[in-house]
Image (spheres, helix red, strand yellow):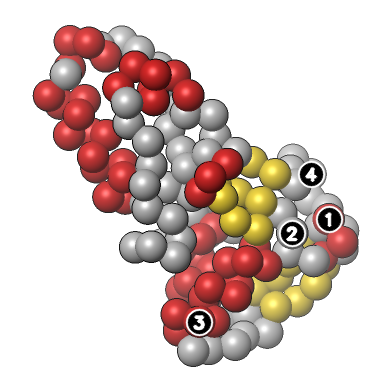
Amino acid sequence: MGKVDQGVFVLWVAAHYFQKSLSYIGYGGTGKQVRNLLHVDDLLRLVDYQLDHFSELDGDVLNVGGGADISLSLLEMTQICEQITGNSIKIQSITEERAGDIPIFITDSSRITAKTGWKPQINAQKP
């Protein structure tokens, strides 16, 4: 299951589904922090490619993520979760920022795309 610092989208969906509370933490408490996401099916397509082309990629260290095209703010994720689950939950607004937190995280997958042609295809609204 997801947690605040890893797997935040899974955490968000689960909290809505099970009607648990959440918090928008830092950056004004507005939920406008942005994170990219990667659907497991997109990741598995890449793993299949790697298995079929092992010698081409052996030893390479390459970033993989949804990139700018497949990213959401927590506020946008809240709206999607409400649509999917039909549940609206309490989300506390905490304006104080946590040490080490960042307002935006977007993975640069350009090297793996250039090497393999792989790109994520599934966004939060197209499972």
Q: Nearer the viewer, mark 3 or mark 4?
A: 3
Q: Residue at x 17, y 10 (%)?
A: 55
SS at mark 1 in the image = helix
Give percent across and percent down for residue 107: 54, 34
The residue tagged 2 is: 32
Q: In the rendered image, which residue does mark 3 sit on?
A: 83
Q: Is residue 72 left or right of residue 41?
A: right
Nearer-the-camera pick, 51 or 14: 51
Q: Which residue type does callout 2 highlight? A: Lys
SS of the residue under disc 2: loop
Q: Which residue is mark 1?
A: 27
Residue 82 seen in this snapshot = yes
What residue sits right under mark 4 in the picture?
A: 99
Crowd around label 4: few <14 · some 14–19 · many ≥20 (10 Å): few
Precedes in sequence: disc 1 or disc 3? 1
- Residue 111 position by quadrant: top left
> Horizontal and vertical percent for residue 50?
21, 25
User: What's the CA distance linking mark 4 and mark 1?
Assistant: 12 Å
**Disc 2 to disc 1: CB gap under 8 Å:** yes
Contact between marks 3 and 4 (CB within 8 A): the answer is no
Asked whether residue 16 appears in the rendered view, the answer is no
Measure the alpha-carbon separation of dots 2 and 4: 17 Å
